[in-house]
Amino acid sequence: NYLNFSAAPVSLQQQEGFFEVVTPEYDPETEGLSELYFSAAAGVFTYDVVQRVFDLEELRAQRLSEFSAVLDQFAVLITKARLITGDDDPALNAAIAQTRQMRVDTLAAIRAIDNVEAMRAFRIRKEDVDYFKGLFEPFI
C-alpha cells in the first residue's frame, strides 16, 4: 500500500494506468496543441503540434479591441485634464487634437491591412501609448 501514489515505482503507476504527460515544445504564436492522447509507442500521454490557422477579420477585430482599450485610457486622461484645466486651454486642446488624429490614423491603418501576416505583426507600441499619455501629464 502506498499513501502517496506518486512515490510508488513507475512500473506500478503504469500498471495502474498512470503514465507521464509530455508536452512538446511549440510556438504559441503560430502553433497549438491537439487533444491529449496516449502514445503506445512512447508509453506517454502527449499532444501533437498543429499549425494555427489565422483569419484576417478575427485578427482585425482583435487589434481593434486592443486599440479600443488604449483609447479608453486616453478618454479618462482627457476627461481628467478638462475637469482640472477647463476646455479653453490651447495646449490641452492641441494635445487632444493630436490624440484624435492618432486615433483616426491608427484606425485607418488597422482597417487597411489586407493580409494575415501584416495583421499578426501589427502592435500598439507601449512607447507610443506612453508618448500620448505624456501629453496630458502637465494638465493632471
Image (cartoon, helix red, strand yellow):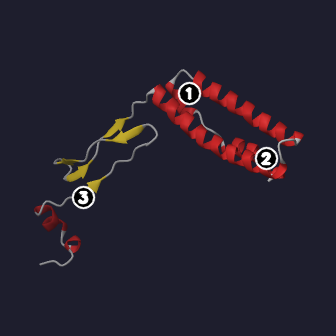
Characterize the local packing of mark 2: few (<14), some (14-19) or many (20 or more) Cα atoms within 10 angstroms: some
Amino acid carrying label 2: it is Arg
Q: Position of residue 11 (x, y in %)?
A: 15, 65
How far apart marks 3 and 1 lie (CA) works out to: 40 Å
Dot 2 or dot 1, earlier in sequence: 2
Q: In the displayed structure, would residue 4 be above or below residue 127?
A: below
Q: Nearer the viewer, mark 2 or mark 3?
A: 2
| Residue sitting nearer the eye, 87 or 50 | 87
How far apart marks 2 and 1 lie (CA) works out to: 37 Å
Name the quadrant containing residue 50: top left
The answer to whether mark 2 and mark 3 are in CB contact below 8 A is: no
Amino acid carrying label 3: it is Glu
Q: With 123 as the anchor, is 117 left or right in this view?
A: left
| Residue sitting nearer the eye, 24 or 73 | 73
Q: Which mark is residue 82?
A: 2
Residue under the image location 19 percent in, 49 percent down: 38
Q: Position of residue 37 (x, y in %)?
A: 21, 47
Q: Which mark is residue 20?
A: 3
Q: Nearer the viewer, mark 2 or mark 1?
A: 2
Q: Secondary structure at mark 3?
A: loop
| Residue sitting nearer the eye, 40 or 137 | 137
Q: Position of residue 114 (x, y in %)?
A: 54, 20
Q: Position of residue 140 (x, y in %)?
A: 79, 54
Name the quadrant containing residue 65: top right
